[in-house]
Amino acid sequence: MSISKRDFLKLTTAAGVASALPAAAGAASLSDFQDMTGDAVPISVDERKARVAKAQRLMTENDIDAVLIEAGTALNYFTGVRWWRSERF
C-alpha cells in the first residue's frame, strides 16, 4: 500500500490533535484538583545559608573561584530574591 506525503501529514496531524484533546468522559476540570500548597512553608534563612555553604564547599572541592548567578530561579534559590530577567545582567 502506498500513501502520499499529503495523506500521511493529514493522518498524523489528525492523530496528534486527537491525542492532545482530553476524552470527554475522563476530562478533569480545575475544580477536580486539590490544593497542594496548604501546608507549604517558606524556606528559612538557615536553609538558604545551608545552600550557600554547600555551593561554597563544592566550589572549593572543584577549584572554582566564582559563580555567576543571573536573575531567575538560581538567584531565587540562593537568595530568595525574585528579580526578572532583562537584556542586562
Image (cartoon, helix red, strand yellow):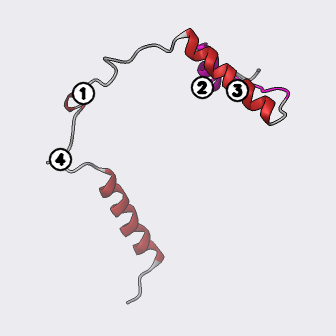
Circle 1 residue = 34
- Which secondary structure lies at badge 2? helix
Q: Are marks 3 and 1 in contact (CB under 8 Å)?
A: no
Indicate left or right for 2 with 30 as reference.
Answer: right
Do the numbered discs 1 and 2 sit on residues whose CB atoms are within 8 Å? no
Task: Answer whether labels 4 and 1 touch (C-beta < 8 Å).
Answer: no
Q: What is the number of the mark on residue 84?
A: none
Q: Magenta span has 66?
A: yes
Across and down, in percent, residue 66 comes to: 82, 26
Q: Which residue carries the number 3 mark? A: 55
Residue placed under numbered mark 2 in the picture? 73
- Provide the residue span drawn in magenta: 65-85
Disc 3 from disc 1: Cα separation:
35 Å
What is the C-alpha distance between the residues marked 4 and 1? 17 Å
Image quarter of the C terminus: top right
From the top left corner, tell me how far across and down residue 77 is, in percent. 59, 22
Q: Which mark is residue 26?
A: 4
Q: What whole-number distance in Å separates the C-alpha atoms at marks 4 and 3? A: 45 Å
Drawn side of residue 67 relative to residue 71, left or right: right
- The kind of secondary structure element at disc 3 is helix
Residue occupying image coordinates x 62% and y 19%: 50
Could you say whether the residue bearing mark 4 is in a helix, strand or loop? loop
Indicate the amino acid at tag 2.
Thr
Disc 4 vs disc 3: Cβ atoms closer than 8 Å?
A: no
Q: Earlier in the sequence, mark 2 or mark 4?
A: 4
As helix, strand or loop, the secondary structure at mark 1 comes to loop
Question: Is the magenta region chiefly helix, strand or loop?
Answer: loop
The quadrant of the picture occupied by the N terminus is bottom left
